[in-house]
Amino acid sequence: MVLTAIDKVGAAVLKATDTFGDFAVLAGRAFAAIFKRPFDVKNLLFQFQSVGVNSIPVVVLTSLAVSMVFAVQLAFGFKQFQAEGLASQVEGLAIIRELGPVITGLMLSGRVGSAMAAELGTMQVTEQIDALECLATDPIHYLFVPRLLASMLVVPLLTVVSVYIGFWGGYLILVGVEGQSAYVYGNEFYKLLAFRDLRIAIYKAFVFGMIIALVGCWKGYRTQGGAEGVGNAPTSSVVTSSLWILISDFFLTKLMLV
Amino acid sequence: MAVIDVVNLSKAFGPKVVLSNVNLQVEEGESLVVLGGSGTGKTVLLRNIMGLLTPDSGHVAVEGKIIAQLSRKELFEVRQSIGMCFQMAALFDSMTVFENVAFGLRRHHKMTEAEVRARVEECLSMVGMKETEKLKPAELSGGMKRRVGFARAIALKPKILLFDEPTTGLDPVMTDVIGRIILDLKHELGITSITITHDLKSAFEIGDRIALLFRGECIACEAPAAFKVNPHPVIQQFLRGDADGPFLQDPPPPKRKSMSNSKEAHA
């Protein structure tokens, strides 16, 4: 009984090590392939559109909703202490430091990471990735690199969009509904912030973009087992990348706020 | 020297041994047909030749280069001289027929767009698919997809063509069309080829030699005429297409008498 339990723990540790090693090797190959020729500009531009332009509505709507709800909560909470003026300061702090990058990262892991996993998964089970290999084309270079570059560049840009929309979401509630002065809101929103905070948010978004693309492509590339495998790949990709986004957010915040 | 040299090739997936000490040589310009039941390792053989799988023991050499020992760059150089036609065509479904055929040309050759267009049209006309270049793979039938797959495989002017069950799942007429296209490619391009098929008619038309894989081993590899009269019971059973014999591991269900026979017996 004890031996069986140890056996199971050992097998789980081996499997986890194997999985992490596989991810690390593929991620390393993807980064190394960035500088290899040929540079597929057309494919890269298509990914910019797919990851970036097509994600704008989702990011705008979620950022607006989250910033508005957050403003409602802040206004209600600070009213208890007659400190309504603090609401816009905390709103700015939360949106730029956390909500902007994290909400953008989580939404894109659902919209973009899952699409990457499904697309590459389908290509894997229909032998299209083998066909790439047979046509002397490295699938990591052809499939991973444009998605990785697009994600790393676009997630920070969308985070800036999210922060901008977050400002107006808070404005709608705190100025439009709660009756605060627009001038005061505009000044207070940035009061607790330094330029460093925006820089940290952009760094975080950059890492989240990396996670979204690498996990999505990795899950798709390793798809096995036909339709069931293709079905599982996006789910697994979203769960894994969302977890990694939240975990890395903690460590990045801890590291960069020192 | 053989263009493709398969030496003592063995491959297993877990406990299941798929290929066991397979030896095959294909000479320049020769067309080898590999026959065998489902799951006997025919596709695994092709995947080892392409370097998509690594042998457990033995090796595959293409033009004297041992595939498993090549660096990734060297492997890609060798692959440019091999055209692979997949069982279900494996066309890139996000691209049009034209883009599929042009893919290798655009990536590996510094050709102008006009030259690419001319080569794609040439390849598509060789397989009788000239009018389809703007279509997406989803708009093609099974036979059309295979033919576009052939066009994509020959676009880079390979020295070797590998066909993985090119006629499986097609009707007899389309099977004949595919067989003729393979024959045309063989005669027009003088390419060395390995064709995996279950279709005996096209196997005897296409093959200069025919090999039979049985339970992971190559039990025969000879000219079609000699293959036909080979007394090996497995070969004879395969040629007859009969369920009774040593071919199947599990005994087949008993043969029922047809209705007309049983009526006659009652009368």
Image: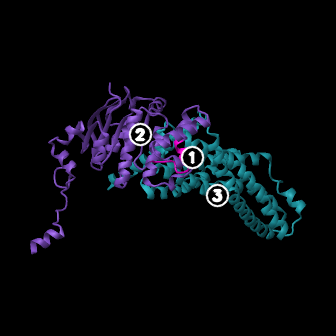
Chain colours: A cyan, B purple
Query: Amino acid type of disc 3?
Result: Met
Rounded to the nearest angstrom, the CA distance separating label 3 from label 2 is 36 Å
Q: Residue at x 75, y 65 (%)?
A: A68
Query: Does A131 sit left or right of A68 as displayed?
Result: left
**Residue under disc 2 on the same chain as residue under disc 1:** no
Q: Is residue B90 magenta?
A: yes
Q: Is residue A178 magenta?
A: no
- Nearer mark to the viewer, of 3 and 2: 2
Q: Residue at x 25, y 42 (%)?
A: B212
Q: Nearer the viewer, residue B181 or B31?
A: B181
Name the residue beneath numbered marker 1. A214
Label 3 CA crowd tier, 10 Å (few <14, some 14–19, many 20+): some
Does A96 sit above or below residue B218? below
Q: Is residue B18 visible?
A: no
Q: Secondary structure at mark 2?
A: loop
Magenta segment: B89-101
Q: Chain of mark 2?
A: B
Numbered label attached to residue B52: 2
Residue farthest to the bottom, as pictured: B267
Query: Does A115 sit left or right of B255 as displayed?
Result: right
Rounded to the nearest angstrom, the CA distance separating label 1 from label 3 is 16 Å
Name the residue beneath numbered marker 3. A107
Label 2 CA crowd tier, 10 Å (few <14, some 14–19, many 20+): some
Comes first in the chain, label 1 or label 3: 3
Q: Chain of mark 3?
A: A
Q: Chain of mark 1?
A: A
Q: Main secondary structure of the magenta part?
A: loop
